[in-house]
């Protein structure tokens, strides 16, 4: 019974597996046929993910934390490799294509590597300085910010704005759990407001100067946000109509009335809601809430510091992706290309999250002890 309690996070995971396969099958009609049998691929990735959970459980988190810096560098090299040798797909160099096997999206694994490396840096800082001064915290913030900015710049150049936003959310959440002075968050917020104001002023009053300084890429991304505000996106309009058509019990399995791009990835929630209606959405939301509760409740319990930092990054990342994806599907948030964890189609994303599940399960089973580096 005690073991089952520690493995309770697997129960909502299995429900999400079923929802994912049903939704991807329903979206298959609107998915590029060159991708092959995406339902079978997703199922295989789930199986591979469960194998990774078992491997992580046997390896233990201590070993992973010791090699977090190496994993971080592997992620950086992979992102740099994409920019130099990557093949553009839909105008983006986000995937390393392996002929006969598929593709790997390094930015998905970079999220995990970033959490692990930042947790190690924060833990080492806290072990070295029990009561750090403002100057010591400032030096740490500069060092850790560089760790986040390096993959952010490489990912932004792909371009993949959604992943960059997730990196920043991870960083902010982990800093919050690190216990640094709250005044740093105020300073950071002020800098963001000033920078954002400058960007918006140039965007609205001197578009050509904006493009000359920041490039057409950034201009296009900001333009997408304002397109969302104006409700002028065909993709969003069709997704909202599809969701609304579902009613209480949906149009039925494999019955999506309208086409919209990225149905199996970014807009998988709209596909699911269209097929299974409000009743199905409630089941999905309750599953997500219970899944999140399993992680949040674990971080509230007494555990060693490095685990708190890791869980802080995981909580921030997953919550942000869930809120952002569902929000953009229903028109409450701008479309940023962020997928729904464990539901959307994608091997790199799914396997990276399954590794996270393995790390979480290890934390459940660990006793109170400090890691030695």
Image (cartoon, rainbow, N blue to C red):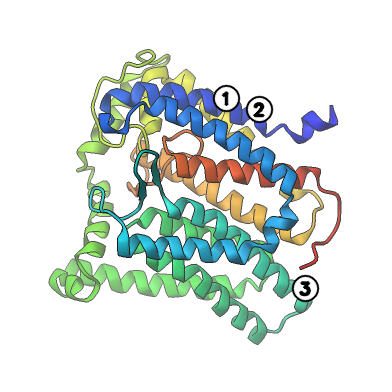
Give residue 27's position: percent from left, percent from top. 33, 25
For the residues labelled 2 and 3, say whether their Cβ atoms are less than 8 Å apart.
no
**What SS does tag 1 mark?**
helix
At x 43%, y 45%, the residue is 324
Residues under numbered marks 2 and 1 in contact, where contact means CB atoms less than 8 Å apart: yes
In space, the residues marked 2 and 3 are separated at their CA atoms by 36 Å
Residue named by callout 3: 127
Q: Residues within 10 Å of mark 2 (few under 14, many from 20)?
A: some
Q: CA distance from mark 2 to mark 1?
A: 7 Å
Element carrying mark 3: helix
The one nearer the camera, 330 or 271, is 271
Judge whether residue 144 can be spotted in this image.
Answer: yes
Residue pushed farthest front?
Answer: 100
Judge whether residue 272 can be spotted in this image. Answer: no
Q: Residues within 10 Å of mark 3 (few under 14, many from 20)?
A: few
Q: Residue furthest bottom?
A: 135
Give the residue pinned by disc 2.
Answer: 11
Instruction: Give how far across and how far down residue 72 sits, in percent.
Output: 55, 64
Mark 1 to mark 3: distance in Å?
Answer: 40 Å
Q: Does residue 202 appear left or right of residue 308 in this picture?
A: left
- N-term-proximal mark, 2 vs 3: 2
Of residues 335 and 25, which is closer to you in this image? 25
For label 1, the residue is 15
């Amino acid at each position: 019974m005690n073991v089952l309690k520690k493995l309770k996070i697997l129960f909502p995971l299995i429900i999400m597996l079923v929802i994912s396969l049903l939704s991807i099958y329903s979206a298959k009609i609107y998915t590029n046929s060159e991708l092959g049998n995406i339902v079978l691929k997703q199922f295989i990735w789930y199986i591979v993910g469960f194998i990774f959970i078992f491997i992580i459980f046997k390896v233990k988190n201590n070993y992973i934390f010791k090699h977090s810096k190496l994993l971080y560098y592997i992620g950086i090299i992979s992102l740099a490799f994409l920019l130099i040798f990557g093949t553009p797909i839909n105008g983006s160099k986000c995937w390393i294509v392996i002929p006969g096997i598929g593709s790997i999206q390094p930015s998905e694994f970079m999220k995990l590597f970033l959490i692990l490396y930042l947790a190690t840096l924060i833990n080492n800082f806290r072990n070295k300085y029990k009561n750090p001064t403002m100057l010591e915290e400032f030096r740490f913030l500069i060092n850790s910010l560089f760790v986040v900015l390096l993959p952010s710049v490489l990912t932004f150049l792909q371009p993949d704005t959604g992943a960059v936003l997730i990196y920043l959310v991870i960083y902010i959440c982990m800093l919050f759990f690190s216990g640094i002075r709250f005044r740093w968050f105020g300073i950071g917020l002020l800098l963001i407001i000033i920078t954002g104001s400058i960007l918006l002023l140039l965007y609205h009053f001197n578009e050509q100067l904006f493009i000359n300084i920041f490039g057409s890429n950034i201009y296009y991304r900001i333009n997408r946000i304002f397109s969302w505000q104006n409700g002028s996106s065909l993709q969003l309009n069709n997704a909202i109509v599809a969701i609304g058509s579902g009613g209480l019990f949906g149009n039925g399995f494999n019955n999506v009335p309208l086409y919209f791009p990225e149905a199996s990835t970014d807009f998988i929630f709209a596909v699911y809601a269209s097929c299974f209606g409000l009743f199905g959405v409630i089941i999905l939301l309750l599953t997500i809430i219970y899944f999140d509760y399993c992680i949040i409740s674990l971080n509230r319990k007494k555990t060693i510091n490095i685990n708190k930092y890791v869980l802080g990054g995981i909580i921030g990342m997953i919550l942000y992706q869930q809120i952002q994806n569902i929000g953009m599907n229903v028109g409450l948030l701008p479309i940023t290309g962020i997928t729904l964890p464990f539901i959307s189609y994608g091997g790199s994303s799914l396997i990276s999250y399954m590794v996270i599940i393995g790390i979480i399960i290890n934390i459940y089973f660990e006793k109170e002890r400090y890691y030695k580096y």
